[in-house]
Image: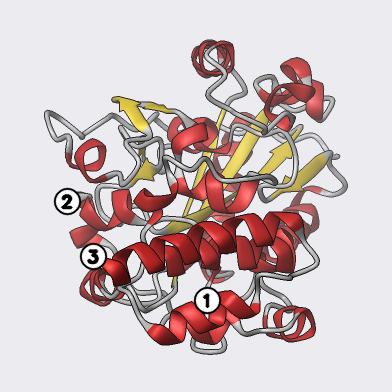
Amino acid sequence: MKSISTLEMADLALQIKQWGQELGFQQVGISDTDLSEAETHLHNWLNKSFHGEMDYMQRHGAKRSRPALLQEGTKSVISVRMDYLPESADAMSQSLADPSLAYVSRYALGRDYHKMLRNRLQKLADKIQQKTGPFGYRAFVDSAPVLEKALAEKAGLGWIGKHSNLINRKAGSWFFLGEIFTDLPLPQDIKATAHCGACSACLKICPTQAIVAPYQVDARRCVSYLTIELHGSIPEDLRPLLGNRIYGCDDCQIICPWNRFAKMTGEKDFSPRHQLNTRQLLDVFAWSEAEFLTKTEGSAIRRIGHERWLRNIAVALGNAAPASSIIEALKLMLNHHSALVREHVRWALDRQLEKTAS
């Protein structure tokens, strides 16, 4: 890398932000690598076992909270955000209110964001390199031990809300994050300040009461964890609380008052695929493994596999209003080759029969 003066570095930072917006990011910010405060919060969270079976949260030691250990020579972190909201809060609320519909977290309705954002970050790095010559960097999109929300907060993109998501005063929280770790000594932006105030809407709305205190989420109770991260059986006492949520949960974002400023995405890749925002539970429950793989190709949903897909939908069918069509569909799955699926189907069938008899 050629020598760059402090003044030139400040000019480069402005250019990076402009290039980022030209590439489709709604905001770009720059931070240093001091995450000592976030590291303490992470250790406290892990010590309470709030991470459940997400062993990867503690597997990498201090690399998660000390960027220079993950990417040697890192002096600055460029954080970006990209809006993904595909529909209105009213539309989402209507889907949640209809127990016959399958609710998929809105971030997963379109193309998997990981590869798309990663490609955009690479283009941003290429533009920087054209200006500076070869430099040290590494791009991340939820793909390594990175405290992305803490870094984005330090970069001024928003503050970490009581539900643990990042909130921006002008854009709400419906956005993805990505980072470029770099050895460039770029000037840092001002850390965002918190504006949750006395609001506790997210704590109250959480269907499983996973937000056990402001800024503390017990993942073991979180619907997103239960339907995506958890590989085994969903605890029976939590199953009725999942409602019709078969992949993730958006309740705390839907209720957040700051999301009245959220903007619909202009990215076609984030538009719903295969009508997954309006699908009937019985429809997606009938997908064979081949159909599941075809219709989730290029989607974040595919990562849970067909077995857990059926597990989640079975729970939602157990929570649905009693119907002979649901009972028949569940009976057809009683001999499924997966013991995990059979267990949840049996539970759902018992629930349906109980409701029918009462």
Numbered disc total? 3
In primary-sequence order, the first of circles 2 and 3 is: 2
Instruction: Please say if the residues under marks 1 and 3 sit with CB atoms less than 8 Å apart.
Output: no
> Could you tell me how far apart the alpha carbons at marks 2 and 3 are, in whole angstroms?
39 Å
Nearest to the observer: residue 229 or residue 325? 325
The residue indicated by pointer 2 is 257
- Tag nearer the camera, 2 or 3: 3
The residue indicated by pointer 3 is 358
Residue at 25% across, 47% down: 169
Nearest to the observer: residue 102 or residue 148? 102
Give the side of residue 85 with respect to residue 200, left or right.
Answer: right
Which colour style is shown? secondary structure
Q: What residue type is labelled 1?
A: Phe
> Could you tell me how far apart the alpha carbons at marks 1 and 3 are, in whole angstroms?
43 Å
Q: In the rendered view of the protein, which quadrant contains the N terminus?
A: top right
Residue 24, image x and y in percent?
A: 53, 70
Give the side of residue 73 with respect to residue 154, left or right.
Answer: right
Q: What residue type is labelled 3?
A: Ser
Give the side of residue 169 with respect to residue 67, left or right.
Answer: left
Residue at 49% across, 15% down: 41
Q: Which amino acid does label 2 sit on?
A: Pro
In primary-sequence order, the first of circles 1 and 3 is: 1
> Could you tell me how far apart the alpha carbons at marks 1 and 2 are, in whole angstroms?
23 Å
Residue 164, image x and y in percent?
A: 40, 35
The residue indicated by pointer 1 is 270
Residue 179, above or below 268 = above
Residue at 84% across, 42% down: 135
Residue 111, picture quadrant:
bottom right
Regarding residue 62, the answer to whether it shows in the image is yes
SS for callout 1:
helix
Residue 106, above or below 34 = below
